[in-house]
Image (cartoon, grey):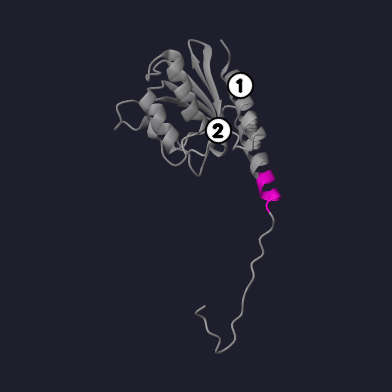
Amino acid sequence: MLTEEAYMELALEEATKAAQLGEVPIGAVLVYQDQVIAKAFNLREALQTTASHAEMLLIDKANEVIGSWRLEDCTLYVTLEPCPMCAGAILQARIKRVVFGAYDPKAGCVGSIMNLLNDHRFNHQVDIKGGILAEQCGELLRIFFKKIRQSKPNKKVIQLSKSKGENNNR
C-alpha cells in the first residue's frame, strides 16, 4: 500500500504528460484495493471535447476495468480540486474518497466555491482530503500558465480618436 503522497506523485506524473502535450497539467489516478486501476490526464485540446478532463477520462477507464459504473470502494487522487462537472461525475460513480492536491478558487467544487461532494441533498457523499502535495501540484499549473502568457504577443490597445463631425456609423 502506497502513501497518499506516493499516489499523488503518480497523479503528478500524469499531469506532466498533459503539460508535454500542451494540455492543462491535471492528472489523476484511481485506486481500488491498494492497486492503481486507472490513470488519466487532461485531453481537452487534443480531443476537442468539453468532458475530456482527467477525472472524466479516468472514470470511463475504471468503469471498463471494474465492469461497472459503480466505483464504490475507490479513491480518486487528482492534482487539482475537481470542477462542478467532475464533482458530479464523482458522485454519480459513487466514488468513496477523493484526495486532491491544489485548491481551485475559480472552479473548485470540493470546498473552494462550494462542496458538491458533501451536500446532503444528494444520495451519496464522498470523503475528501485536500492539499496533498499542493505546492507541487500548484507549481506545475503556475509554470504552465506562465509559459502560455509569455508565448502570446502583447496586445496593445489602440485608441481611435474621432474628430468632430466624423461619422460614427461605419
Residue where numbered disc 1 is placed = 10
- For the N terminus, which image quadrant? top right
Residue in the image at 44% along x and 22% along y? 97
Question: What SS does tag 1 mark?
Answer: helix
Could you say where residue 92 lies in the image, as x and y percent from the top left? 36, 27
Residue in the image at 52% along x and 81% along y? 168
Residue 110 shows up from this direction: no
Q: Residue furthest bottom?
A: 165
Could you say where residue 63 lies in the image, as x and y percent from the top left? 43, 19
Q: Residues within 10 Å of mark 1 (few under 14, many from 20)?
A: many
Q: Which quadrant of the structure image shows residue 145?
A: top right
User: Does label 2 or label 1 sit earlier along the sequence?
Assistant: 1
Dot in front, 2 or 1: 2
Q: Position of 138 compared to 117: left or right?
A: right
* Residue numbers of the magenta segment: 146-152
Residue where numbered disc 2 is placed = 42
Q: Position of 169 compared to 159: left or right?
A: left
Against 122, residue 50 (above or below) is below
Q: Is residue 149 magenta?
A: yes
Residue in the image at 43% along x and 14% along y? 66
- Give the amino acid at mark 1: Leu
Residue 139 shows up from this direction: yes
Q: Nearer the viewer, residue 84 or 17?
A: 17
Against 73, residue 92 (above or below) is below
Q: Position of 44 compared to 73: left or right?
A: right
Magenta span dominant secondary structure: helix
Q: Which quadrant of the structure image shows residue 25?
A: top right
- Give the amino acid at mark 2: Asn
